[in-house]
Image: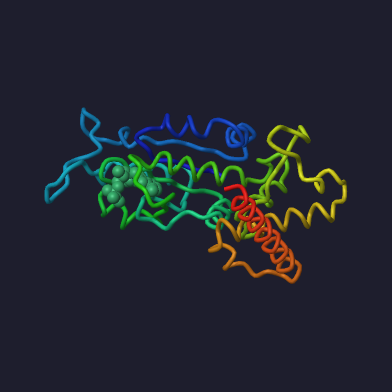
Amino acid sequence: MRIDVITLFPDLIEACAGAGVVGRARERGLLEVRTWNPRDFATDNHRTVDDRPFGGGPGMVMMVGPLRDALERVRAAGGPARTIYLSPQGARLTQAKVAQLARGPRLVLLCGRYEGVDERLLAEAVDEEVSIGDYVLSGGELAAAVLIDAIGRLQEGALSDAQSAQQDSFSDGLLDCPHYTRPVRDAWGEVPAVLLSGDHAAIRRWRRKQALGRTWLRRPDLLARVELDAESRRLLDEFRREYVTARDQAEAGKDRTG
Ligand code: SAM
């Protein structure tokens, strides 16, 4: 897959997309990331890309001209591509959206700065707006880096074990189960015995139960959207009963000591 990023701060994208899983995916040719600086498409000696907003008010606005020319060059270089503007006003990014975008051959990401981008450019040249959350960043680069990372790790061959992405939070609508590694015993607790049992069916059931239980505790909104089979419903009931019993016992203990 190829991702072209239009940004005033190409170094920020390079720094974020050059390490770890995504950096390796790029090295192996599974993902190509290219950056384009709108300043290279400015027409004056100062390489101006922004101007004051009509109607007055604070801040600057990114101008249509340099962005349009940058977009034209990007499209000429690699053919038509879905163009996404990273924006706090866009649809909030989800794993389902990431998976959908990761299946495409190509994407163009437009990073805003200042007060944002002249609305005419957005209306004419952008296919959709994507937000990484309900807060405002000073520029679209970190949001683009988030998107590149989430898409990059889903490229076939990017993760050493393809199953690991399928077990991650959100991929089947639930949060992931807890994970443990060595040592078995530590001052802060023991690894649950079932994980050491070698009984793969029991381990699968335990993990499913924990994933269901965590989602119930932390993200009931997600659980409400998932269709559960009979086994999952039974495991979730078990988790709830055990959770309530443990909580009641802890409270009774506090009452006795306090
Ligand atoms: N005035 C804009 C508004 O309130 O909608 C915010 C502009 S913000 C300071 C500058 C740039 O950061 C935006 O053009 C956008 O590209 C990026 N940005 C800020 N918050 C973002 C978010 N939550 N998700 C994605 N991009 C964001």
- Say which of 90 and 102 sits in front: 90
Query: Residue at 62% across / 67% down in the picture?
Result: 226
Residue 60 vertical position relative to residue 228 in the rendered view, above or below:
above
Classify residue 35 as left or right of residue 119.
Answer: right
Where in the figure is residue 112, as x and y percent of width and height? 33, 43
Classify residue 50 as left or right of residue 73.
Answer: left
Where in the figure is residue 106, as x and y percent of width and height? 52, 48
Quadrant location of residue 73? top left
Query: Residue at 83% across / 43% down in the picture?
Result: 196
Query: Residue at 47% across / 31% down in the picture?
Result: 14
Quadrant location of residue 188? top right
Residue 177 vertical position relative to residue 14 in the rendered view, above or below:
below
Whether residue 149 can be seen here: yes
Classify residue 69 as left or right of residue 23.
Answer: left
Residue 237 vertical position relative to residue 153 in the rendered view, above or below:
below
Q: Dividing the image into 4 quarters, which one contains the N terminus?
A: top right
- Say which of 216 and 27 sits in front: 216
Q: How is the image coloured?
A: rainbow
Where in the figure is residue 58, as x and y percent of width and height? 17, 43
Where in the figure is residue 127, as x and y percent of width and height? 40, 57
Number of residue marks: 0
Classify residue 207 as left or right of residue 36.
Answer: right
- Say which of 190 and 136 sits in front: 190
Residue situated furthest left in the rendering: 56
Whether residue 68 can be seen here: no
